[in-house]
């Protein structure tokens, strides 16, 4: 009893985010995810504070913990000084460490996030760059974005002298030395290990699900685009 | 010569303490910072659970204080005390043989809970505002029209770490039910909602009143604390909460949002406690010597407590405590 | 709005000498805003600001997508601080709201849990050989703009008023969630009544509109937008805000978070294309500005030099109301006036794109 709770408590965000919940529902009342999904941050905090291993394991393997948008609207309002958003962050981190995230549709999406955002950070030093926002994957970005995307050098060139080149300014290419430092930071601080963990468990799950090549591009695109519509 | 006992505070607890002391042949003196006696009861409309007019209780206490010839210094503030004296704001020192501290508590300032927009949005009121409106005979929305949907929110400034008020104010639950009934009597067509976490009906007749609110008046009880209030374009108030019993978030617009404000420790408790070394609870209220066998005694000999200076209480409890405190003080001075 | 509490939430904002950290989203979608911020500070206000080529993303989007661990982002942040120290600066100013939240949260975590700061120092030294001191001051770029709002008002070429009627423009302000919801004291005005944008709007002649969903998130929700399958969450939350503000007929929306500005602009397009619903008074969209663009327009910058052509919803109706001169034909030109084609028209757009010079014709 309390094995997972103890593991969670190793995360400072849990120590900061969970005192004792009295189930008032203030967090849920203001939660954007609760209005959209079948989601209730209050109940998550309630389950975690029960320290029930079985219930927490079910949570770590569920879609539920992946609905939160981490907007932190719950944080300033909680009358007990809890932060359900921090509890979620700790749950997600543990779910990935233990490989439980691949057991849910929303959890499996971590692979796409790792490959899109994570790898881009190591490649460019930014979370997002214009070439990453491909109009075919982002129809919502509209006709102006399509125009920008098609003429990026002309458009961005008006605002930055160093678009995709070295130097100071917007959308510059970050120098190799700095990028090496970022990569070494990921190596020494657990970032690279997290990436490998996500890949390893995704590959295992992909094979289990019948993807013969494991977590290949097809698997990644499937987790990126598929929605079972069972979340509401 | 009569023993003189200084009673700090002229609310119901202070008046009853003085009356009981006078009955026993002692010489009480009431020191009240407001221009008249009465404390929190002034401006209150009716009392739970019997809907007794507050004025009835107040008038009776004031009449007896007058008839007993008890000395009352009004518009007089105490800034320091010892078991034998109190220092007033103007520097004068009153001496006596014992002190009863009955300085009460402070109503929570609802504007501190910024998310409810009290003082900013029209049609957000406090329970104290509602009592005043009933007394003035003008209960309505800000624009003077009748409300069709009213929400009461329990625990505003109580059980809330964010505003440093972790204690339960005890009387707001029953006040909320009482005011909901009063509103429903006045506006039978209106829908009335009470948003609560726990309904703490601890006194005689309270639970029965809660049941009556549901059964006779069809007042709705929603288990969930309101997350935020905001103004709508037609002058109403939009509220968000979770109905925690169904586990679903809820959003509605109401004509009036009434915040049931709690009781907090007076700001000057800290400075008053400093001189004689009185102990205070974490909540800032004074801490009685012993919660069971000495709840009207302080940790300092010769200083006694009556009423809400030690914790939120009902009028009845404050009156009983005042009697007990007066008796203890009388014993202390050897009467 | 009767905001009384904002003065109780004051924060110290440095007067000069800023170490600038850019925003991934800002530079992608509003590169003109970033340029405008630097130009306004250095050219108009004569302040010193360093744009250090060595600094990087804070990795905050990765962190809030839960793929970048806390220890890692702490070390990346520590590297930024080290670079700032090495360049001789101590006032850290960041253009991104996610980053601003990250910096304030990490500094608070180091305070609360000193062992995490020790571990970060160790990690940073191991990875880069660098050491760091914490900044004297951390501010968001909107704080800095707020700080100089009166000076900007004195130099104003245009005000946020209808040039014809003289009436103040009605402005909806949207504050990025991580500006003050994580630490209410870190934001001007706190988390319930943030004053950072309202202060600029009022100084420059506009009127702030309060509406029921003012404090609601724009709907970014990190993984809820970044993963295609989840975007229903994102559009639904923007939709909720737009529905809630539309009855107040705002002249424009302004946001201090680059992501929020982008989403409130782009989701109007998507909603219009999907459902035919538009929220502007002209049957098209409500223009969405960044606060840098708002300041730039007030100071008389050319709208296209501010990059306003990169928005999906046309801003021209607002420019017309403010009495700002602009060349419609120059809107979609490339560098040195080069013709590069123009975007296809959409429901939210109201300005004919056929006036654009086509040198081939």
Image (cartoon, rainbow, N blue to C red):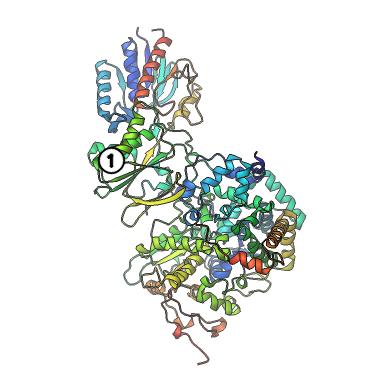
Tell me if residue B319 comes above or below residue C261 in the rendering. above
The residue nearer to you, when weighing C221 against B295, is C221
- Residue B104 x, y percent position in the rendering: 39, 27
Chain containing the residue with disc 1: B
Tell me if residue C340 comes above or below residue B222 in the rendering. below
Give the residue at x 35% y 55%: B232
Tell me if residue A33 comes above or below residue A15 in the rendering. below
Residue C78 lies left or right of residue B279; in this view the side is right
Residue C141 lies left or right of residue A103; in this view the side is left
Would residue B7 be visible to someone looking at this image? Answer: yes
Tell me if residue C300 comes above or below residue C55 in the rendering. below
Give the residue at x 60% y 51%: A89
- Residue B235 x, y percent position in the rendering: 31, 54
Would residue C55 be visible to someone looking at this image? Answer: no
* Residue that mark 1 sits on: B183
Give the residue at x 34% y 11%: B26
Residue A148 sits in quarter: bottom right
Q: Residues within 10 Å of mark 1 (few under 14, many from 20)?
A: many
The residue nearer to you, when weighing B170 against B244, is B244
Number of numbered discs overlaid on the protein picture? 1
- Residue B279 x, y percent position in the rendering: 51, 24
Residue C172 sits in quarter: bottom left
- Residue C151 x, y percent position in the rendering: 47, 62
The residue nearer to you, when weighing A210 against B206, is A210
Helix, strand or loop status at disc 1: helix
């Amino acid at each position: 009893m309390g094995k997972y709770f103890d593991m969670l408590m190793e995360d400072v965000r849990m120590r900061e985010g969970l005192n004792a919940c009295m189930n008032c529902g203030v967090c849920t009342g203001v939660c954007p995810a609760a209005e959209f999904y079948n989601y209730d941050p209050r109940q998550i905090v309630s389950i975690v504070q029960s320290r029930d291993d079985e219930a927490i394991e079910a949570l770590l393997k569920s879609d539920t913990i992946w609905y939160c948008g981490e907007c932190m609207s719950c944080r300033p309002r909680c009358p007990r000084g809890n932060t359900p958003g921090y509890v979620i962050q700790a749950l997600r981190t543990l779910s990935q460490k233990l490989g439980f995230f691949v057991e849910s549709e929303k959890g499996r999406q971590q692979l796409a996030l790792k490959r899109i955002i994570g790898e881009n950070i190591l490649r460019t030093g930014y979370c997002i760059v214009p070439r990453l926002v491909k109009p075919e994957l982002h129809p919502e970005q509209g006709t102006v974005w399509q125009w920008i995307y098609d003429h990026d050098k002309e458009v961005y060139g008006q605002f930055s002298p160093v678009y995709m080149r070295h130097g100071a300014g917007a959308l510059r290419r970050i120098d190799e030395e700095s990028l090496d430092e970022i990569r070494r930071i990921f190596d020494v601080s657990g970032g690279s290990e997290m990436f490998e963990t996500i890949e390893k468990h995704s590959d295992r799950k992909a094979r289990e699900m019948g993807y013969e090549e494991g977590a290949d591009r097809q698997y990644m695109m499937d987790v990126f685009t598929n929605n079972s519509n069972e979340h509401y | 010569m009569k023993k003189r006992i200084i009673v700090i505070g002229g609310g119901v607890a202070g008046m009853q303490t003085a009356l009981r002391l006078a009955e026993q042949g002692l010489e009480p003196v009431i020191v009240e910072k407001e221009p008249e006696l009465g404390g929190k009861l002034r401006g209150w409309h009716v009392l739970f659970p019997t809907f007794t007019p507050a004025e009835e209780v107040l008038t009776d206490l004031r009449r007896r204080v007058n008839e007993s010839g008890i000395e009352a210094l009004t518009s007089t503030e105490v800034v320091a005390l010892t078991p034998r004296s109190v220092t007033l704001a103007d520097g004068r020192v009153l001496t006596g043989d014992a002190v009863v501290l009955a300085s009460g508590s402070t109503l929570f300032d609802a504007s501190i809970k910024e998310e409810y927009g009290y003082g900013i949005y029209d049609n957000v009121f406090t329970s104290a505002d509602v009592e005043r409106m009933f007394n003035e005979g003008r209960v309505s929305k800000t624009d003077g029209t009748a409300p069709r949907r009213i929400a009461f929110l329990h625990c505003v400034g109580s059980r809330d770490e964010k505003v440093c008020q972790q204690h339960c104010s005890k009387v707001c639950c029953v006040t909320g039910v009482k005011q909901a009934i009063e509103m429903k009597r006045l506006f039978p067509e209106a829908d009335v909602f009470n948003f609560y976490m726990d309904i703490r009906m601890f006194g005689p007749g309270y639970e029965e009143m809660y049941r009556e609110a549901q059964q006779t008046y069809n007042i709705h009880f929603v288990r969930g604390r309101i997350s935020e209030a905001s103004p709508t374009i037609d002058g109403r108030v939009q509220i968000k909460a979770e109905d925690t019993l169904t586990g679903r978030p809820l959003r509605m617009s109401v004509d009036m949002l009434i915040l049931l404000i709690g009781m907090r420790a007076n700001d000057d408790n800290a400075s008053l406690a400093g001189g004689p070394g009185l102990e205070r609870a974490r909540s800032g209220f004074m801490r009685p010597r012993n919660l069971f066998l000495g709840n009207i005694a302080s940790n300092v000999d010769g200083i006694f407590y009556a009423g809400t200076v030690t914790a939120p209480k009902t009028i009845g409890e404050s009156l009983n405590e005042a009697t007990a405190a007066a008796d203890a003080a009388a014993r202390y001075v050897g009467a | 709005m009767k905001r009384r509490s904002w003065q109780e939430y004051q924060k110290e904002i440095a007067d000069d000498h800023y170490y600038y950290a850019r925003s991934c989203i800002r530079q992608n979608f509003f590169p003109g805003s970033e340029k405008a911020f630097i130009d306004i500070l250095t050219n108009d206000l004569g302040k010193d600001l360093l744009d250090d080529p060595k600094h990087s993303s804070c990795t905050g989007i990765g962190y809030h997508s839960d793929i970048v661990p806390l220890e890692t982002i702490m070390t990346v942040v520590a590297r930024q601080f080290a670079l700032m120290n090495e360049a001789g600066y101590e006032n850290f100013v960041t253009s991104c709201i996610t980053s601003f939240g990250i910096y304030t949260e990490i500094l608070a975590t180091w305070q609360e849990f000193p062992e995490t700061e020790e571990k970060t120092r160790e990690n940073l030294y191991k990875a880069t050989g660098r050491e760091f001191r914490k900044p004297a001051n951390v501010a968001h770029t909107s704080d800095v703009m707020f700080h100089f709002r009166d000076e900007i008002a004195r130099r104003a070429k245009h005000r946020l008023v209808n040039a014809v009627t003289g009436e103040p423009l009605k402005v909806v302000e949207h504050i990025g969630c991580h500006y003050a919801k994580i630490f209410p004291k870190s934001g001007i005005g706190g988390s319930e009544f943030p004053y950072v944008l309202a202060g600029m709007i009022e100084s420059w002649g506009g009127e702030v509109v309060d509406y029921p969903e003012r404090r609601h998130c724009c709907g970014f929700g990190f993984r809820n937008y970044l993963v295609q399958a989840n975007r229903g969450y994102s559009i639904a939350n923007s939709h909720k805000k737009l529905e809630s503000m539309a009855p107040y007929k705002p002249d424009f929306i302004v946001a201090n978070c680059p992501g929020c500005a982008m989403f409130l602009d782009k989701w109007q397009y998507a909603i219009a294309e999907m459902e035919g619903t538009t929220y502007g008074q002209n049957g098209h969209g409500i223009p969405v500005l960044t606060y840098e663009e708002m300041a730039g327009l007030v100071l008389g910058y050319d709208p296209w030099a501010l990059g306003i052509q990169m928005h999906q919803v046309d801003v021209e109706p607002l420019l017309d109301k403010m009495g700002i001169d602009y060349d419609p034909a120059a809107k979609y030109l490339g560098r040195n006036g080069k013709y590069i084609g123009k975007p296809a028209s959409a429901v939210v757009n109201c300005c004919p794109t056929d006036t654009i010079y086509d040198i081939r014709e």
